[in-house]
Image: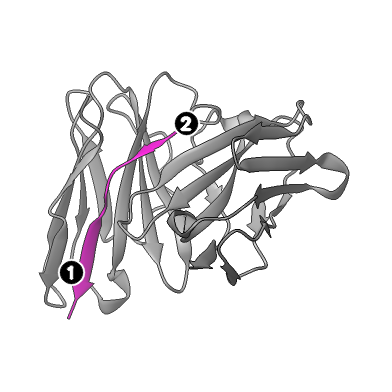
Amino acid sequence: AQKVTQAQTEISVVEKEDVTLDCVYETRDTTYYLFWYKQPPSGELVFLIRRNSFDEQNEISGRYSWNFQKSTSSFNFTITASQVVDSAVYFCALSEAGRGGADGLTFGKGTHLIIQP
Amino acid sequence: GAGVSQSPSNKVTEKGKDVELRCDPISGHTALYWYRQSLGQGLEFLIYFQGNSAPDKSGLPSDRFSAERTGGSVSTLTIQRTQQEDSAVYLCASIEGTSGSYNEQFFGPGTRLTVL
């Protein structure tokens, strides 16, 4: 069965520091998709990124970057020069292609990121 | 355009009562998901609809939970004889296209259910 582990329950940093959120996953499928979602205090989950299992290229989007390594089954998320608006709960999630999405997303427990001014 | 909407936003009920939660997906989205978010269990998948059919209901926590979708649009999640452990935020998501494994899920704001 698939599993996503986010070992960091809460991280607190001072604004402008860089911060990395860890995500480790388990799956038996060879084709799968990894996601990061952000849940701000308002509560609505916001999609950030998707990677498929065949694409290990790192991705950068502004201050956000993602490091996908199949060898360590990790999909880590880094925010550079953090800002107070980045404060939220961040979820890593996995979807296996084999069931065509019928099993939904498997989420990690989330990391609560607090950016202090 | 309009996103996924859910109603009510908050629901307080007494133990043993039935509740009905509603989800309006984004227009044209064919697939719909229900999740539950609670402090103890995190985000759990409950059920998936492709059109009006739910091929697998094994994710529902107990037989007190049921869900339906009519007209390929609105979905309702019904919890009968509510228990205190049902207290959680119930989230709905919809996707464009049919491949839920690949496509971005668009989430609604959730219904916060409190069972007293």
The residue at the point 14 percent across, 54 percent down is: B20
Where is residue B26 shown, x and y percent of the image?
Answer: 25, 28
Is B71 situated left or right of A73 in this image?
A: left
Using the image, name the chain to which the residue with label 1 belongs. Answer: B
Q: Does residue A104 belong to the magenta stretch?
A: no
Q: Which three-letter amino acid code belongs to the residue tagged 1?
A: Arg
Q: What residue is shown with label 1?
A: B81
Q: Nearer the viewer, mark 1 or mark 2?
A: 2
Asked if residue B112 lies in the magenta stretch, the reply is: yes
Q: Amino acid at mark 2?
A: Glu
Question: Percent from the top left, x then y, of residue B115?
Answer: 20, 75
Q: Nearer the viewer, residue A48 or A85?
A: A85
- On screen, residue A20 versus residue A49, left or right, reads right
The answer to the question of whether label 1 and label 2 lie on touching residues, with beta carbons closer than 8 A, is no
For image coordinates 17% across by 81% down, the residue present is B116
Q: Which residues are magenta?
A: B104-116
As measured in the structure, the alpha-carbon distance from the residue carrying label 1 to the one carrying label 2 is: 34 Å
Observer-nearest residue: B80 or A39? A39
Q: Is residue B83 above or below residue B6?
A: below
- B31 or B3: nearer the eye? B3
Q: Tell me the residue at 57%/55% (across/down).
A: A82
- The circle on residue B104 is 2
Question: From the image, which quarter does the N terminus of chain B lie in?
Answer: top left
